[in-house]
Image (spheres, grey):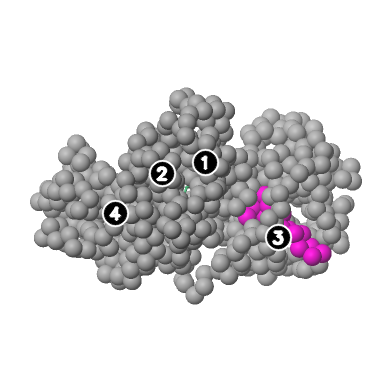
């Protein structure tokens, strides 16, 4: 949700910042802007729409050469996506420029106060108040001005600013919103995400809550909002720039779908010993007293949690609740020190999930994060973390992160089951998990008919998804992918619920995708879903059936049959989700949509 870049060093700041913004565009693409600190003062360019619009504008009307700059790519909250509302925002004298991610909740009061003191606020944004406040309090030290201003702000924010009267200096601040420092030789970077500077340095510094950072070409200093020196964590980024490139694919999403066998293998790596035993040293939590598991997450990560519930309850015999994080803390959930809360988040910055985990910890629960982003807020604030090691996920629609979240959930469930002595045949299950990368790879090699089917359905007005057991959250995930990418009406249902209402939606030719449970693991469920397929077919539905190899019972009722490898029933989502990702991606492409950057969305949702 908004991407921010800051640079000071010896390179052309304009190029560094534009390059960084391009890598952060997945965070928001409503407008883009940049300010450079040049010899004659600050110079700014900004445009509504994608970064390409800004690039065109700057080609026609270039900014002066400079070695210091800040930039922003926006996901609009306050004020529409216009040139005027695009960041950076400047004060009346145009001496200070600021970019912002988050929401300043007391901006209306600050705005009235500033207007009463004669300031002219030109945009509709909450951000602009910060520029005017910084301009008012600046007395030669931008970091000190930032500390003073931050103490007055309420809400969630990352701010990055430059001042014309303090050459070579970029200042950042963060509260509840991401900001990382990239340390180079004779140059330093600030960004919402390491992807922005990974082409220049892999040495990063994680900033803590309520901290202000002053960046010069030759040094970085960090304090809290009161000006006391702060302790920060330095780390090395374990992937390089090529991991964040398209690598020959037309879209990041296609690349990330294709990367799934490796991503799944990387999540397993180091967590299973040569003897087939789990080695989960990261789970430095006392699990013995756990009496209940609660999973909180949003969107696709929530679907991973919804699948995990089946495995956790089956393998550990502990009750497990799953809840969308945005609902969780507002209903006064029952939590105590015997509750293990699992927060699942690819980005580690999703505000709803962060707030849910904070609430859980306040109630005494232990929180275990499943996360893909090293140094992000959710793992930092959790009691333990299991990183998924999926590598950077750039496409807005989550794919490889989902599969790796599932693997992490299975590992946790198995580990808990082992600790409690409740997991049936843990060694067999570990063996089946280890087969997953190859099985996902096999699915990927058989996707051409799925792509052809997707293209043929580009004009469909709706698609329904049905599943039972773990196939139900898979159906929800398939529907979510189609909604966000193809902008189509898509709904996922528990197949057993069909008769309780949704069957009224079935009409002639309506495509319905059915995820069929394994006939070996769940013979009763299998029989029931075969009946469900017959029921919808009798009412005119066009049935698209995802069923495991060797499942012959479904074939007579499938207008289209998509085969997946036979797996343990609980692990089936690892292979059954892949055709749904491919289907949504291809259908969206056929409709001419921007697959990596669907309308109205942003990858990392850092506001509630
Ligand atoms: C859908 C999607 C979103 C995210 C959700 C949570 O494809 O990507 O639904 O899954 O916004 O994001 P994280 O996992 O970063 O907390």
Mark 3 or 1 closer to N-term? 3
**Residue 373 in sight from this viewpoint:** yes
Indicate the quadrant where residue 204 lies. Answer: bottom right
Residue drawn where x is 46% and y is 61% of the image: 274
N-terminal of the two: label 2 or label 3?
A: 3
Residue beneath label 4, please? 568
| Relative depth, front residue between 178 and 75 | 178
The residue beneath circle 2 is 418
Q: Position of residue 443 (x, y in %)?
A: 32, 66
Kindly state the secondary structure of the residue where label 4 is placed: loop
**In percent of the image, x 36 and y 49: which residue is there?**
426
Which of pointers 3 and 4 lies earlier in the amino acid sequence? Answer: 3
Q: Is residue 562 above or below residue 487?
A: below
Specify which label sits upstream in the sequence, 2 or 1.
1
Total numbered circles:
4
The residue where tag 3 is placed is 203
CA distance for labels 3 and 4 = 41 Å
Q: Which mark is residue 368?
A: 1
Q: Residues within 10 Å of mark 1 (few under 14, many from 20)?
A: many
User: Closer to the camera, 6 or 367?
Assistant: 367
Residue drawn 20% across and 41% down? 496
Q: Position of residue 464 (x, y in %)?
A: 26, 50
Disc 3 vs disc 4: which is toward the camera?
Answer: 4
Counting residues from the start of the chain, the first of labels 1 and 4 encountered is 1
Question: Magenta part of the protein: which range?
Answer: 179-193
Label 4 Cα neighbours within 10 Å, binned few <14 / some 14-19 / many ≥20: some
């Amino acid at each position: 949700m908004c991407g921010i870049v800051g640079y000071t060093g010896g390179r052309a700041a304009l190029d560094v910042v534009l390059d960084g913004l391009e890598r952060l565009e997945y965070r928001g693409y409503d407008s883009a802007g940049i300010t450079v600190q040049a010899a004659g003062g600050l110079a700014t360019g900004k445009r509504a729409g994608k970064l390409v619009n800004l690039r065109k504008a700057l080609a026609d009307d270039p900014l002066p050469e400079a070695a210091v700059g800040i930039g922003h790519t926006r996901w609009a909250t306050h004020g529409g996506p216009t040139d005027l509302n695009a960041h950076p925002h400047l004060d009346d004298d145009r001496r200070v420029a600021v970019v912002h991610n988050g929401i300043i909740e007391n901006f209306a009061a600050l705005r009235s106060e500033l207007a009463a003191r004669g300031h002219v606020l030109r945009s509709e944004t909450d951000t602009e108040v910060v520029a005017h406040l910084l301009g008012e309090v600046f007395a030669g030290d931008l970091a000190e001005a930032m500390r003073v201003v931050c103490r007055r702000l309420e809400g969630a924010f990352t701010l990055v600013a430059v001042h014309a009267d303090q050459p070579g200096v970029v200042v950042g601040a963060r509260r509840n919103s991401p900001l990382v420092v990239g340390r180079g030789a004779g140059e330093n970077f600030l960004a919402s995400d390491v992807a922005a500077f990974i082409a220049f340095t892999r040495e990063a510094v994680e900033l803590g809550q309520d901290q202000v950072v002053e960046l010069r070409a030759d040094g970085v200093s960090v304090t809290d909002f009161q000006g006391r020196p702060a302790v920060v964590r330095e780390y090395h980024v374990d992937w390089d720039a090529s991991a964040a490139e398209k690598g020959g694919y037309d879209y990041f999403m296609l690349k990330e779908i294709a990367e799934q066998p490796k991503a799944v293998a990387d999540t397993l790596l180091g967590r299973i010993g040569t003897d087939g035993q789990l080695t989960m040293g990261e789970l430095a939590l006392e699990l013995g007293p756990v009496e209940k598991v609660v999973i909180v997450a949003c969107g696709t990560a929530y679907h991973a949690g919804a699948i995990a519930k089946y495995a956790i309850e089956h393998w550990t015999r502990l009750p497990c609740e799953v809840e969308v994080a945005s609902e969780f803390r507002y209903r006064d959930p029952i939590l105590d020190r015997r509750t293990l809360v699992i927060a699942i988040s690819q980005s580690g910055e999703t505000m709803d999930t962060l707030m849910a985990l904070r609430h859980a910890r306040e109630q005494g629960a232990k929180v275990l994060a499943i996360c893909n982003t090293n140094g992000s807020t959710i793992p930092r604030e959790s009691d333990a973390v299991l990183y998924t090691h999926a590598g950077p996920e750039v496409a807005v629609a989550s794919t490889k992160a989902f599969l790796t979240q599932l693997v992490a959930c299975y590992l946790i469930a198995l580990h808990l089951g082992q600790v409690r002595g409740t997991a049936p045949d843990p060694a067999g299950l570990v063996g089946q998990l280890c087969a997953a990368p190859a099985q996902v790879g096999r699915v990927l090699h058989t996707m051409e008919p799925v792509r052809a089917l997707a293209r043929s359905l580009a004009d469909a007005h709706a698609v329904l998804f049905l599943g039972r057991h773990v196939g139900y959250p898979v159906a929800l995930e398939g529907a979510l992918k189609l909604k966000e990418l193809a902008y189509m009406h898509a709904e996922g249902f528990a197949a057993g619920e069909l008769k309780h209402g949704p069957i009224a939606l079935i009409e002639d030719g309506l495509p319905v995708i059915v995820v069929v449970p394994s006939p070996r693991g769940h013979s009763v469920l299998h029989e029931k879903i075969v009946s469900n397929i017959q029921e919808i077919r009798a009412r005119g539905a066009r049935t698209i059936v995802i069923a495991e190899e060797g499942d012959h019972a479904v074939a007579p009722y499938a207008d289209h049959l998509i085969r997946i490898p036979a797996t343990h029933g609980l692990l089936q989502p690892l292979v059954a989700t892949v055709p749904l990702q491919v289907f949504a991606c291809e259908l969206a492409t056929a409709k001419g949509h921007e697959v990596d950057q669907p309308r109205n969305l942003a990858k990392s949702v850092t506001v509630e």
